[in-house]
Amino acid sequence: MLIKEVLQRRDQLKGYLHSLSIAQNYCEKHIGDIVMIEDLKSMYKELEVEFKQIDESLKPFENMDM
């Protein structure tokens, strides 16, 4: 993968995580469907793992002096 693609994927995952967080919060406060809340939490955890892997792999590039 090109670095550009990895950065785009990281940004995309960040957006997904933010949206899932909002959806989970809304569901907890207004809907109260426990199954839906658990599904949202599960999706969030899966995406968070991928996001953290990508973020950690990009640390050396961010620390490089240009």
Image (cartoon, rainbow, N blue to C red):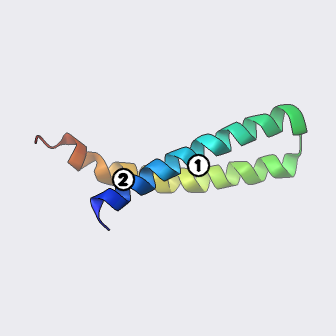
Mark 1 is surrounded, within 10 Å at the Cα level, by few (under 14), some (14 to 19) or many (20 or more) other residues, namely: some
Q: Please give left or right for residue 18 compared with residue 60 in the image.
A: right
Q: Tag 1, which secondary structure?
A: helix
Task: Give the residue drawn at x 24%, y 43%.
Answer: 62
Assess whether mark 1 and mark 2 are in contact (beta carbons under 8 angstroms). Answer: no
Please determine whether, in this image, residue 17 is positioned above or below residue 9: above
Location of residue 9 by image quarter: bottom left
The amino acid type found where label 2 is placed reads Leu
Q: Judge by depth and name the residue closer to the eye, 9 or 40.
A: 9
Q: Please give left or right for residue 8 compared with residue 26 in the image.
A: left
**Residue 45: x %, y % from top left:** 61, 51
Residue positioned most to the left: 66
Residue positioned most to the top: 29
Q: Tag 2, which secondary structure?
A: helix
Q: Judge by depth and name the residue closer to the eye, 45 or 18.
A: 18
Residue at the disc numbered 1: 16
The amino acid type found where label 1 is placed reads Tyr
Q: Please give left or right for residue 26 compared with residue 60 in the image.
A: right
Q: Which mark is residue 33?
A: none
Task: Give the residue drawn at x 58%, y 45%.
Answer: 17
Task: Give the residue drawn at x 50%, y 52%.
Answer: 12
Position of the N terminus, as image quadrant, is bottom left
Mark 2 is surrounded, within 10 Å at the Cα level, by few (under 14), some (14 to 19) or many (20 or more) other residues, namely: some
**Residue 30: x %, y % from top left:** 87, 33
Q: Which mark is residue 7?
A: 2
On the question of residue 15 being in view, the answer is yes
